[in-house]
Image (cartoon, grey):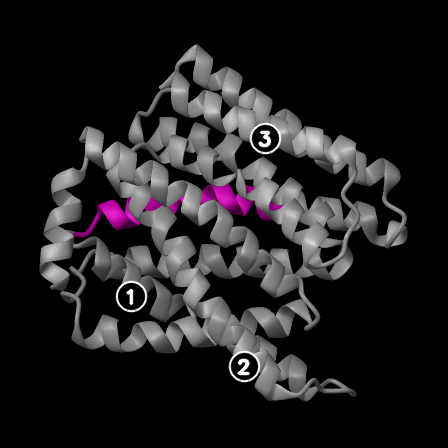
């Protein structure tokens, strides 16, 4: 079954059907990534949430990596090592940013920085190019995303004292988003079977944060109860498989830059989640800026 799925996906690479599937996967990843970010920023400490999530998807991926998918080719071990370093640095920066700032402040900056540099990286590494209309779409999308960040900077009342630090951390996190997007696209294309990369990536990526989270939990004066945290981790692990797995497969099937841009419609979903679930304020100006983000993504897709 797994080999049949792999062969089917590989057969779609570079085709019109592959492009359509990559579009569906990228937008699905956008929604799921917003849910994933909200889980990390919810009522638990973001370090503990991330540790529980990573432990869950690492343990879930292990049987598939060890016993189901083909064994990685020798050159893949260096690629996995690089992915481990990049993703660990990204997660450390993101946890720090969420500690300092509100979800609806941090998330737009992180996701807005990522696609611009991912498009540049896709050009340098994969030789991908955008049409002038697609660049217009990127500009519209980024205007909406960074407009949200500026709006938050001006009008947000909570956590004002840590807001500059949160924005700087969010910017640095966004740079690592671009780095891991292009690096993972290279990695998943470097192996014959894309599911080999996915299974081993999730197993290896689930090592670092659970250790840090366990140390943090042990040193807390008021330790949160473990069952709710582990439940959050299990749900987050499943969402991570669907979200990160979808965007990785999209970058193998079609252009890395387009997938990276389309995924950043997650900012719209994130603002809706922040408003409806986390009870953060969303006004008409922010709704207009979110419409810009969605419009930019549509222009990028139609302009191709």
* Kind of element beneath mark 3: helix
| Side of 233 relative to 228 (left or right) | left
Give how far apart the Cα atoms at labels 1 and 3 are.
33 Å
As drawn, the label of residue 87 is none
Q: Dot 3 corresponds to which residue?
A: 293
Of tags 1 and 3, which is closer to the observer? 3
| Side of 198 relative to 226 (left or right) | left
Of tags 2 and 1, which is closer to the observer? 2
In the picture, which quadrant includes the C terminus?
A: top left
Verify whether residue 189 appears in magenta. yes
Give how far apart the Cα atoms at labels 2 and 3 are.
34 Å
Q: Relative to residue 151, is residue 157 depicted above or below?
A: below
Verify whether residue 294 appears in magenta. no
- The chief SS type of the magenta part is helix
Q: Dot 2 corresponds to which residue?
A: 230
Q: What stretch is highlighted in magenta?
A: 172-191
Residue at 44% over, 11% down: 132
Residue at 40% over, 42% down: 26
């Amino acid at each position: 079954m797994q080999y049949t799925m792999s062969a089917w996906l590989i057969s779609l690479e570079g085709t019109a059907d592959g492009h359509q599937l990559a579009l569906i996967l990228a937008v699905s990843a956008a929604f799921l990534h917003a849910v994933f970010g909200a889980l990390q920023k919810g009522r638990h400490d973001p370090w503990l949430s991330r540790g529980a999530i990573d432990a869950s998807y690492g343990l879930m991926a292990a049987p598939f990596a060890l016993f189901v998918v083909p064994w990685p080719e020798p050159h893949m071990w260096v690629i996995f090592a690089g992915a481990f370093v990049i993703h660990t640095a990204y997660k450390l920066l993101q946890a720090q940013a969420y500690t300092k700032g509100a979800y609806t402040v941090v998330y737009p900056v992180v996701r807005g920085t990522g696609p611009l540099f991912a498009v540049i990286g896709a050009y340098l590494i994969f030789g991908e190019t955008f049409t002038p209309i697609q660049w217009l779409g990127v500009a519209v999308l980024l205007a909406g995303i960074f407009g949200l960040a500026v709006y938050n900077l001006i009008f947000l009342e909570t956590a004002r004292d840590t807001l500059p630090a949160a924005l700087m951390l969010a910017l640095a996190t966004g740079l690592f988003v671009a780095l891991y997007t292009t690096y993972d696209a290279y990695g998943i294309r470097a192996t014959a079977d894309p599911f080999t990369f996915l299974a081993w990536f999730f197993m290896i990526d689930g090592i670092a944060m659970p250790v840090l989270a366990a140390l943090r939990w042990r040193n807390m004066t008021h330790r949160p109860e473990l069952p709710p945290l582990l439940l959050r981790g299990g749900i987050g692990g499943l969402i991570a498989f669907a979200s990160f797995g979808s965007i990785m497969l999209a970058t193998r099937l079609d252009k890395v830059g387009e997938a990276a841009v389309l995924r950043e419609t997650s900012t719209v979903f994130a603002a809706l989640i922040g408003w409806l679930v986390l009870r953060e304020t969303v006004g008409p100006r922010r709704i207009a800026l979110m419409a810009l983000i969605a419009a930019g993504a549509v222009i990028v897709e139609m302009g191709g």
